[in-house]
Image (cartoon, grey):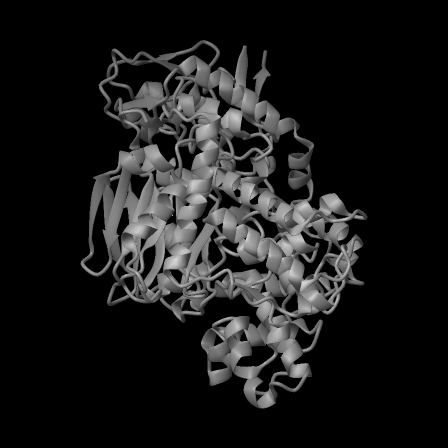
Amino acid sequence: MSHLRVIDAERCVGCQLCMFACHRRFGKGGLGKSAIFVRSRGGMSRGFTVVVCRACKEPPCAAVCPVDALRVRKEGGVILQPHKCIGCGNCKEACTLGAVFWDEEENKPVICIHCGYCAQYCPHGVIALVKEE
Amino acid sequence: MLNHDPLQRVLYIDLTRRSFRIEHRPDLFERYLGGAGVASALLLEECPEGADPLEPENPIIFAVGPLVGLFPMASKTVAMFKSPHTGNLGESHAGGRSAVSIRMAGYGAIVIKGASDIPVYLTIFNDKVQFHDGRALWGMRSDFAARATREKESGSGMRTIMRIGLAGERLVSYACVITETYRHFGRLGLGAVFGSKKLKAIVISGKSSLPVVDRKTYKKAYNDIFQQLLTKPSLKKYHDLGTSLNILPLNKICALPTRNLQKACFEQAEEISGEHLAENYLGRRIACTHCPIACIHLAALREPYKDEPYFYKTTFISYDYELIYALGTMLGIGNSRGLMYLLNEVEILGLDAISTGVVLAWVTEAFQKGLITEKETMGLKPAWGDYETYVEIMKKIVLQPNEFYQAVAKGAEYASELYGGKEFALAFGKNEMPGYHTGYGGHLTFLTGARHSHLDSAGYSFDQKFLGKEVPPPEDYANHLFAEESYRQIISSLVICFFARGVYNYPTIERLLKIAGFDFSEESLKGLGEEILKQKYRFKFREGFSLDQLRIPKRILETISPHGRLQEEFIRKAIAAYKRLLS
């Protein structure tokens, strides 16, 4: 199984190409539906933090979903079943890492599915899709 | 353009009445694309003829373009205003997070008019535009003001924070606006226009999706551009060393203005070169949003506190070619730490680094020649290489405690009118000189470029094609620079970083614009570039600019360039040819 991993956030230059890539999966430009997030650690001189789902085996986000819209994958992490989701936002609150993002247009969470598309666009070796046993 | 593209929305803000409105202006974007094209059209609409740049009637216009948020390195914002420095066209570009933030907030352009009675800062979060009490930020260093705003407001990671330092508040005519700490609307005094409106900062943020004509074509085109950007050797150089990679090559050909261009090579260039700074100080690289290159280089300067042993502070200071020239070689600073003190101070105060360095160089030479004395400088003795004194002078330029500093706060042209020394006041169209004494092309760009910036038509690059060869006739210079400046209007209307221009050629632009819903042929793009350039010049002529009366500082004719001694007659002929092309 493969997971998206942050290899070395110190190499991050804050270009956010990963965020654009994640959004572009849907064939659109912009940032509103990205499941990965890069922000400065309080001013750019301090470097950047990459926030993304780390594929918990027992994900708090799924535990608090009142309608079981987040299916837990056996390799860790969750898959959103949009038809079930009622947009309550409990999952967003529950994620300790802040890795559940919100699609304002759809009023539903956006969570990394560990496809690795973003990693193909990181020129600086910050993130990678890693095969794990 | 596509029906739902938020690009067509223009946000009009009135600081006097603390009100705003949003207008749909597809007419502007369909005709001029965005950036420089749209901003110059808005400037002609919004800025009354003969307006005082520091009065409420002067508009501040920000514009982005259709490719922002869709393609990499479409990452710049164009600012236009009437310049308090030249009294004419004010245009300045900056990257950071600014362009993507404006586009994601749902706008193609923002127009700010009026003036507040008390200091304010603005937040623009999509359709929510708010005016906030800025009194607690007034008088604050640019970096501290940013920190306070960053901690108070939301939008981390997705926002731009534009702000001014004390220089803008005190209306120094070459004060800059800083965005994301290390990028600047540097030239022509946007900071003073902010200051005159009592506008300390603007925070802009939003989350949007952008439509495209065809999803598959979009993804394919993106990959194509991305690969080209990653494999271009010229871009790799900007990642490795940044723009400061140019210090040594330009010094080698003796085109690097030194000590107010008394010479064009610097004996200590090695010490302040990109290579030296990278090896000894480089602490981090950062990128503008959506740029894979990351050309912004930050030096980590570790300094001991003088009052306590083993107690240090580390400051991150951005450096670029133009800054090393203006605050380094022009001032005879061969000490890299000394250079960094100057870079840091210019950042804190919010001054344009190029103008500041050139002004300080004029002050030094005027002092040496006895045109000014310690009476004017209030006891300070400017001398080449003495960075500590330069820091003190900079502070005085901002505070303006006497008539001399009030004059110097208006630039080298103005100060030399009062105190003499015009022949070595290195200003072109009243804007201080960028760092290239490469030959005719460089200086012709400073003279004829609509914003008197080296980037207008990059004549310094044209010059270097003829090293060791005979130069072409003046008309050829004019033709080349006119075509280049016209092409660059398209690039800066799409707000693509000039570093990426090798990838974004006319056919590529035509193809990418189709994906964004714009139909422009290569021919029509060429015509549009000229039209936008002429539009900018229409504003310049309206406000009294004249190519015939341009002052050519004698110093550039005295100091040997890589093409030998430059002749005034040649320059005048080329300017006359440029004028014919504009009509």
- Of B211 and B576, the residue lying toward us: B576
Left or right relative to B149: residue A9: right
- Of B453 and B117, the residue lying toward us: B453
- Of A37 and B513, the residue lying toward us: B513
Q: Position of residue B154 (x, y in %)?
A: 33, 44
Q: Quadrant of residue B503?
A: top right
Q: Position of residue A62 (x, y in %)?
A: 34, 18
Left or right relative to B476: residue B113: left
Q: Quadrant of residue B555?
A: bottom right
As displayed, is residue A93 above or below residue B350? above
Residue at the limit of the structure toward the bottom, as seen here: B375
Quarter of the image where the N terminus of chain B is located: top left
Q: Position of residue B545 (x, y in %)?
A: 44, 62
Q: Position of residue B392 (x, y in %)?
A: 57, 76
Going 25% across and 24% down the picture, which residue do you hit?
A107
Left or right relative to B28: residue B273: right
Going 51% across and 71% down the picture, which residue do you hit?
B411
- Report whether residue B366 is seen: yes
